[in-house]
Image: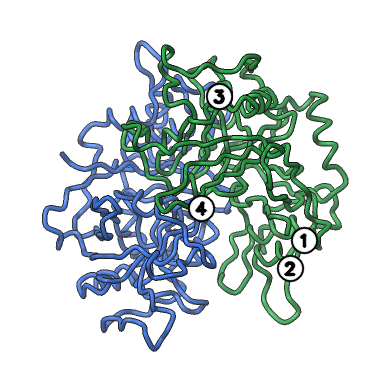
Chain colours: A blue, B green
Amino acid sequence: MKHALLLCTALLASCSAASAPATPQGPALAPTEIVAAAPAADWSPIAPSDLLVMDLAPDTKGAARRVVIQLLPAPFSAGWTGNMRKLAAAKWWDGTAVTRVQDGYVAQWGDPDGEDKAKAKPLPPGLKVVPIEEYAASASSPELQAFLKQSQGGTQTVLPKDSYGANGEFRSGWPLGTDSSAVWPIHCYGTVGVGRDYPPDTGSGAELYAVIGQAPRQLDRNIAVVGRVIEGMEHLSSLPRGTGDIGFYKTAEERTAILSIRIGTDVPGIPRYQYLSTESKSFAAYADARANRRDSFYVRPAGGVDICNVPVPVRRVK
Amino acid sequence: MKHALLLCTALLASCSAASAPATPQGPALAPTEIVAAAPAADWSPIAPSDLLVMDLAPDTKGAARRVVIQLLPAPFSAGWTGNMRKLAAAKWWDGTAVTRVQDGYVAQWGDPDGEDKAKAKPLPPGLKVVPIEEYAASASSPELQAFLKQSQGGTQTVLPKDSYGANGEFRSGWPLGTDSSAVWPIHCYGTVGVGRDYPPDTGSGAELYAVIGQAPRQLDRNIAVVGRVIEGMEHLSSLPRGTGDIGFYKTAEERTAILSIRIGTDVPGIPRYQYLSTESKSFAAYADARANRRDSFYVRPAGGVDICNVPVPVRRVK
């Protein structure tokens, strides 16, 4: 390829290892094949305490609908994820609903009466009001340095500056935007964020949405990102679209009821999940293959990739 | 803004007009407000002869499901769109089905028995076998020059090189990738493309898909793009996901039947549609606002935008 747009900054030796994986007899591996071949050591556990498990009402055929969300680690959005842990512990979301599904944009859930102060469901005590500054982590903050330290020593996958003026990095399993002054979580397909009113409101974390279309990167650093859907995304993305303004359902009957939302440690029998370590050579090879498809179906590798087109692989532990 | 990433190349005077639209009393307009305020002269007609109208079987509540697709103009993918016109005229798709819905990727339709040569529905005579070279238009071809000539003289909206190594341009209503040697249609949310087998097969146009997730730009110049959904996208994007490999439905019962697919001129009572001229100042202002959200909800304009996050506005004529 003329333009190898993926850079490997931490361990230059790993760049050649990550490039052009090929079977001895045939064409290069597809990204899914690279993931399937990754050794056990390249998979990292996701703590059940970092999961938010949402059970929707069963579908029209009576099938269960569970959406599993992985919460962002500190220092990112810690004020909001802290609130969400309190809301889950208080069983606050039980009996709320998916209230909005806007095609190509978001599915949103929370209190259907939240807009009406007289009827809104009271929030549990002790929720923080988080300032706008916490949409991103300052490059110089000790908390960010501590987070970055966790991923030191491995293979770093870094993407060049994108259409949003951000460099892209993967760290400890998360796609992040960076510039010289800050690091921030970004909006991709499946990203979960915090609904809010007009600024300076930043939302409490009681009103949430998941991205169901093209990555709305214009929301980065304008709204709190708190996690991502790692299983059951189809239960949100395939819901009927709302026919009201910006996808809100016009009637209560159209909404999908939320039975419960709990932290993973409070869910009996919750499976164990792992993500492909973003500091592994397997991930670097996977990202390179996403940018340069050389497997049999393709005739022309792109030579680059959008960070939201490199979803971090997640699997259940058997 | 420090980084004004949108460039206006054709009419420099229009750049200032396109930047930072603001109401006299308040903050800048949102993209939807700019579109709503566009004068009638900035809207261009879409010929009914360029529409492909797909009627799916009614939903579980008996509601009609119509998907309206606008076909790409020549010189792009003309071999495939020509085949599609023949397939529609032959009513070939009637009785076929949506056979695959893969979350975050594509909804695909065609002959459910297409993979089995013994059972496959015979194609009408006269379909072209289109070469791989037609995935893009050569920069020097007279056909491309004729197409580009149509959009001369207006305001050009051009985006800088993106993560896929392509510059982005809007021409006569279409987002296009460009480099020094070629111009090609790209894969965004709602883009319709041609399913195919392994190369050198390029597909006939009988097997089609629409993108229902993050833009799979790695498919650009690897597969034929033939159009985009301009109405009824939700009838594809909200279908149940297939539980088989890569989203294929495991059983015939899970598929959604296609009642008919016709060219717009053969559909009684088809509405008239218009697109916001991509050579208009309104479109330039809209694209600028998509890249730099300065309306009340936002605290930090991005300073740039992905070409697939600037969907060309389409409306029904009242």
Visible in this render: residue B222?
no
Give neighbour class at mark 4: few <14, some 14-19, many 20+ (Cα, 10 Å): many
Q: Secondary structure at mark 4?
A: loop
- Crowding around mark 3 (Cα neighbors within 10 Å: few <14, some 14 to 19, many 20+) is some
Provide the residue designation for mark 4. A104
Q: Are marks 4 and 3 on the same chain?
A: yes
Name the residue nearer the viewer: B204 or B17.
B204
Which residue is under mark 2? B21
User: In the image, A73: left or right of B268?
Assistant: left
> What subunit carries mark 3?
A
Asked if the residues shown at circle 1 and circle 2 are in contact, with their CB atoms under 8 angstroms apart, the answer is: yes
Q: Quadrant of residue B192?
A: top right
Q: Residue at x 51, y 57 (%)?
A: A180
Amino acid tagged 2 = Pro
Marking on residue A300? 3
**Callout 4 amino acid:** Gly
